[in-house]
Image (tube, rainbow, N blue to C red):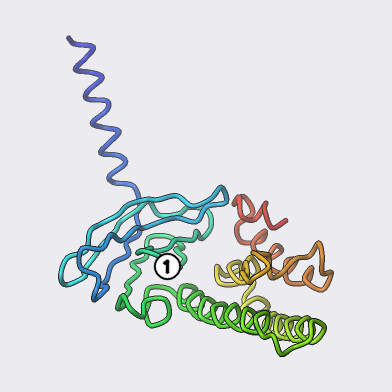
Amino acid sequence: MKKTLVTIAAGAMMLAACDNSPKFQVSGTIEGAKDSTLHLIQNTLDGVQKLSSVKLKEDGAFSFKAAAPTGAPEFYALQIGGHIINFAVDSTEHITIAAQLPTLKDGYTIEGNESSKKIKEISLKQQKLQARLIEIEQNEDMLPGDQRDSIENLANAYKESMKKDYILTDPASAAAYYAVCQSITDLGGTYMLFNPVSDRKDIKCYAAVATAWDGKYPDAPRTQQLC
């Protein structure tokens, strides 16, 4: 009996310690989503991990808390149906999001850190790029060679914009990591936008982010992935 009590006490102490661990918070409202389930997910190097969920009420209010990342920024998302809002967390900040379900993918506002604002900008530009690529691929009035040239020119212009506005300006940021690791989906499938294996010009972007992260977050798994 004494041993059992000691075990229970030890378990309670462990739970208390977990409750007192550093956390970040993400909260806000999603209008027009009554009875929909909102998920908080983490995009890890091993895949997507669901952290928590809530069924939204009439006012659409939500609030999640989760263990704060240590050692380097991490990437998270709110998911409701097929809609996703991506954001980054550095430590114990409070991210606030306001959106309406019909226009959630491009009409939301986000506050809490600068990288999350930039990730929103990148996400919206990426959506426009994907839509334009598919539009070109579906254009039956264009010759295959003209389609390839248009797609290549569009992708190269987009990559130059990413380099100038997000990657090389602050390569140690979560936004720079997010930008250099983008995946693009078109009718041909999903592929890495920046790929130093197939395009040597992309090495400069990877090297800039890898060097900056190695200097700021040398022990982080994401730094090892980049390097």
x, y percentage for residue 136? 67, 84
Q: Quarter-wise, where is residue 209 in the image?
A: bottom right
Q: Between residue 219 and residue 167, name the one nearer to us.
A: 167
x, y percentage for residue 185? 61, 69
Q: Quarter-wise, where is residue 25 in the image?
A: bottom left
Identify the residue at the far bottom of this view: 141
Q: Between residue 38 and residue 18, name the one nearer to us.
A: 38
What residue sits right under mark 1 in the picture? 84
Identify the residue at the far top of this view: 1
x, y percentage for residue 47? 53, 50
Report the number of numbered marks: 1
17 displayed left or right of 35: right
x, y percentage for residue 44? 52, 52
Q: Is residue 41 above or below residue 28?
A: above
Name the quarter where the N terminus is drawn: top left
Q: Is residue 143 above or below residue 19?
A: below
The residue that appears at 56% across and 72% down in the rendered structure is 175
183 displayed left or right of 113: right
Identify the residue at the far front of this view: 140
Q: Amino acid at mark 1?
A: Ile
16 displayed left or right of 106: left
Q: How would you rate the neighbour count of disc 1 (Cα within 10 Å): few for under 14, some for 14-19, many for 20 or more?
A: some
Q: Between residue 63 and residue 5, name the one nearer to us.
A: 63
Q: Quarter-wise, where is residue 108 in the image?
A: bottom left
The residue that appears at 24% across and 76% down in the rendered structure is 31
Name the quarter where the C terminus is drawn: bottom right
**Element under disc 1:** strand
Q: Is residue 215 above or below residue 115?
A: above
